[in-house]
Image (cartoon, rainbow, N blue to C red):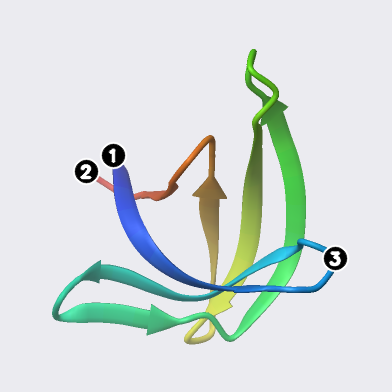
Amino acid sequence: MKRYVDVLNVYKRDGTMIPKEIYFDEDHSYAIDRVKKVEKTGVWSDGRESFTYLCDIKGWSAHLYFGPDRWYVYLPE
């Protein structure tokens, strides 16, 4: 199930976006310990890009997706 989430980001001088924390709701947030890999996963017809971030969160690997304008994750149903 696709779920949109709020994400706290850091933007580097070169424009790179680094996610630092995921917020599922007011009671559930998770710090991202490390971004292991970033992949460009697509380009929309208007030129906006989509990305997949492979992150370490509390010792687990998780995928976090951005595109075209918001963050989301896939949760088991």
- Horizontal and vertical percent for residue 33? 58, 86
40 sits to left or right of 53:
right
Mark 2 or 1, closer to the camera = 1
Q: Helix or strand or loop: what does disc 3 sit on? A: loop
Q: Position of residue 45 (x, y in %)?
A: 64, 13
Judging depth in this view, the residue of 6 and 61 nearest the camera is 6
Mark 2 lies on a secondary structure that is loop
Res 1 label: 1
Judging by the rendered image, the residue that carries numbered circle 2 is: 77
Question: Is 23 displayed left or right of 44 in the figure?
Answer: left
Percent position of residue 34, x then y: 65, 81
Question: Relative to 53, is 45 above or below?
Answer: above
Mark pair 2, 1: CA separation: 6 Å
Q: Residue at x 47, y 86 (%)?
A: 58
Q: Quadrant of the C terminus?
A: top left
- Percent across and percent down for residue 53 are 64, 57
Could you tell me how far apart the alpha carbons at marks 2 and 3 are, in whole angstroms?
38 Å
Say which amino acid is labelled 2.
Answer: Glu
